[in-house]
Amino acid sequence: MEKEIRVRFAPSPTGPFHIGGARSALFNWLLARKTGGKLILRIEDTDLERSSRESEENIKAALKWLGMDWDEGVDVGGEYGPYRQTERLDLYRKYTEQLLAEGKAYYCYCTDDELEAERQALVAQSQMPRYMGKCRNLTPEQIAEFEKEGRKPTVRFKVPAGQQIVIHDMVRGDVVFDSDGIGDFVIVKSDGIPTYNYAVVIDDALMHITHVIRAEEHLSNTPRQCLIYDALGFEKPVFGHISLILGKDRTKMSKRHGATSVDQYRKLGYCPKGIVNFLALLGWAPNSEQEIFTTEELIQAFSMDHVAKNPAVFDLDKLNWINQHYMRQLDDEAFFEAAKPQMIEAGFMTGEEEGDKLAWLKKVVLTSKEHVSYAAQIPEVVAMYFHDDFAFENEEAAAVLKEETVPTVMNMLFEQLGQLEAVDATGVKATFKTIQKTTKLGGKSVYMPIRVALTGNQHGPELTEIIPLLGLERTLKRIKGSLEKAGVTLA
C-alpha cells in the first residue's frame, strides 16, 4: 500500500502573516487535498522573545479566511502532539541526551565574544565563517573550569568530516553540500531551548512528515537537518524548496512593493478566493493557459512537477485582474457586505442604516461593481453620491461645457426631467432619446456635457444609474452649479 502523504505548515508566530508564508501553506494544502493526504499545522515558537499568541491567532485566522483547513495540529489535535514546540521540550531533551551519550554532540562553553573573534579571523583569511570545533574535545578539567566561571553551555552537533550531503529536491533536482563547509552547529541554546534546525527534524520525524515543502531560503538549512536525521536514525522526508517571491523590479518582496501580509489584503477587501487563485500561480504553472481557477480546479490541477525553480514575480496588476473577476462573481448582497467596512471607514455610512436609506446605499454601492478590483476602491468610485460640491477632473472636462450646443442640451434636459412622473432608469433613458431626436445631435454631444456637469468627470457609471440615485432636485442643483462654474448661462 502506498504511504499516506503527510505535509506540514510550521510558521513562526513572530509578526504579521506574510503573503509568502500563505503561498507555502497553500502548496502544502493543495498537495494534501490532491492526494487525500494530511496537512499538519505546527507552531514553531522557540524564538521566545519574538513569538506571541497574538501572532499565532493571526496566522490561524488568515489560513481560515483563505479557506485552508488542517487535519492535525493546534486547535485540532492529533496523535502526534503537542503541536507547539515550546510544549515539546521534554521530547527534544531526550534526543539531545542520546546524541551526547553517543558522542554525536557535545557541550560548547565558548562566549559570544570568542565566537565573534573566530568569525572575524576566518573572514580576514577569506574563509567561510564557521565554528572550528574549539570545545569538541574538552578535558574534564577544562569543563570544570568553565563551569566554575559560571558559563552556561550550548550543545553543538558534531559534523562528520569529508561528507557529501545530497538533497533530492522535488523542485531543484539534486543539490550537493560539503560537510566540511558547515562547522559544528548549535542544536540547543544555553537556555535549554532547541534551535530551529534541531527541533524541526525531531518534529517532522515524530509526526511522520513525508514531504517538506517550504521556501527556498530554507535550502541552506537542509544539509544540517539531513545530518541530524542520519545521526538519530530517522527516515528523511522528500524536500521541495519553492522559489522566492520577488517584486516587479526583481528584488525580494518588501513593503515598498505594496501590502505584504495576508491581513492587509483582507482589510483592503480582496476576495479570499482571488488571493488563493493568484498565490497558486506564483511559482506553479498549470498544464494549460487557464488563469482563473475554482478551489476544486486548483486541487485537481496542482502538481509539484510544475513548480518552477525560478523566482516568482508578485504582479499586483495581475492580482487585481484576478480579484476583479471574483468581485464581479459576488451576488449583490455579498458585494454590499464586502463594501460595508470600507464605506463605514470612509464615513459614507454608519452600519446602522435601515429602510429607504439602506436600500439607497445598496443601489449606490452596486454602481461600482464593474469598476473596482477590490472593495477598498468602492468609496472612491461612489464618492460622487455623497458630495454635491466637486471640481472638474481636468481642463479637458471643463472645456466640454463650453461647446456651443451645451445650452440647448441642458435646457431640454431640465424640461424633460421636470415632466417625468418617476425619475428612474427608464424615464432617464427616454429623456436622452428625446433630446437626441429633437436636437439631431450625436450621443457624445448629449451624454458628455451632462456627465461632466453632473459629476465633474468624463467617465464613470451609467447616467441612467446616477440620475435616479441622486434624484431630480440634486441632479438639477449639481448641473446648474457646474454651468455657473464654467460660465455657461442658459436662456
Image (tube, rainbow, N blue to C red):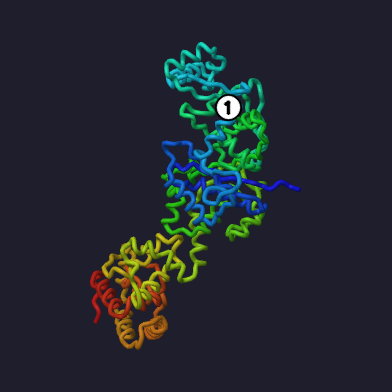
The kind of residue on which mark 1 rests is Glu
Position of 458 relative to 262 (above/below): below
Q: Position of residue 132 (x, y in %)?
A: 54, 18
Which of these two is toward me, 421 or 192? 192
Position of 366 relative to 202 (above/below): below
Quadrant holding the C terminus: bottom left
Kindly state the secondary structure of the residue where label 1 is placed: helix
Asked if residue 450 can be seen in this view, the reply is no
Which of these two is toward me, 360 or 205? 205
Q: Label 1 neighbourhood size at 10 Å, few (<14), some (14-19), many (20+)?
A: few
Q: Position of residue 334 (x, y in %)?
A: 46, 68
In the rendered view, does 22 fall on the left or right side of 5?
A: left
Position of 122 relative to 246 (above/below): above
Tag 1 residue: 97
Position of 87 relative to 63 (above/below): above
Which of these two is toward me, 255 or 317? 255
The residue at the point 48 percent across, 16 percent down is: 121
Q: Position of residue 311 (x, y in %)?
A: 56, 42
